[in-house]
Image (cartoon, coloured by chain):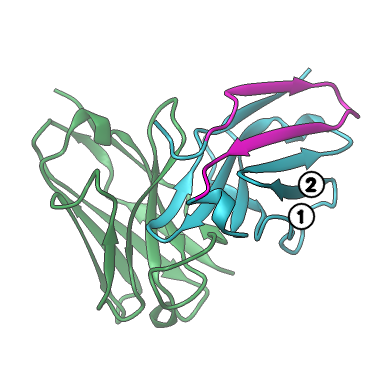
Amino acid sequence: QSALTQPASVSGSPGQSITFSCTGTSTDLGDYYYVSWYQQHPGKAPKLMIFDVSSRPSGISNRFSGSKSGNTASLTISGLQPEDEADYHCSSYTNSGLVFGGGTKLTVL
Amino acid sequence: EVQLVESGGGLVQPGGSLRLSCSASGFIFSNYAIHWVRRAPGKGLEYVSAISSNGDSTYYADSVEGRFTISRDNSKNRVSLEMTSLRAEDTAVYYCVKSLGDATVTYYFDYWGQGTLVTVSS
C-alpha cells in the first residue's frame, strides 16, 4: 500500500481540463511544500512535471499546474491532448525520505 | 546532457542475488547523490535506496534494509546496488535517479535512467 493515495484512473476528452488528486497525511504531504508530480508513458522513465507543489521545470508546458490544500495536492492538465495519456505519480518529501502515491492512469478518450 | 544507464537486471530465483549498475555522464558525478527507485508491475513508484556524493551516507527503505547494499565508484562514474535474498515482491523495473545535491536527502528527482527489469521467479 502506497504512502500517498491517488485514484487508479481518470479519463477525459481532448481539449478538456482534468485534475488529479493526491492525498497524504499531516506528517507527509500536509507538513511540507515539497510535492512533485511525474508523468510516465508505458515503457519509459518517469518525467518530472511539477516540483515544490506548483513549479514547472524548464520545457514543461504551462498546461500543467499544481496546487496543495491541507493534506491533498492536485495536478491539473488543461487543454488535454492525446499525448498526455500516461501514468501520473505524485510524491512528497518526508523526514523519512520521499514517498509516492500508487499512480493514476490517464486515458484520453 | 545528463544520462543515466542501468544494467544488470534479469531473471533470478527467490533467495538469489543480483547486482545492478548505473553508469552516469553529462554532469559532475562526484558532486551528486544517486538514488534507486523501483516500480513493480501494476504498482506505483517506490523509493528504494540512496547514496551520498562521497559514499559516506546511505539510505534504505524498510522493505530492502539488510538485503540490499548500495555503493559507488566516483572514479568510474558508477553506482551499484547489490541485491541479496531476493523475493517475488522485489520484481520491478529499477530506475537510477540523480539527486538535486550531494546529500541523500532530496525533495524531488530531476533526471531518471530508463530502468532495468528484475524478475524474481522460480
**Rendered image: mark on residue A106:** none
Asked if residue A36 is among those painted magenta in the image, a careful observer would answer no
- Residue A22 lies, in percent from the top left, at 61, 38
Q: Residue at the spot x=65%, y=58% of the render?
A: A51
Viewed as shown, does residue B112 lie left or right of B65? right
Which residues are drawn in magenta?
Answer: A5-26
- Residue B56 lies, in percent from the top left, at 25, 78
Q: Is residue A64 above or below residue B39?
A: below
Viewed as shown, does residue B32 lie left or right of B79? right
In which chain is the residue bearing label 1?
A: A
Q: Residue at the spot x=40%, y=58% of the render?
A: A97
Chain A colour in the picture: cyan
**Rendered image: mark on residue A60:** 1
- Residue B114 lies, in percent from the top left, at 47, 49
Q: In the image, which is nearer the foreground, mark 1 or mark 2?
A: 2
Kindly indicate the quadrant of the structure image that contains residue B82.
bottom left
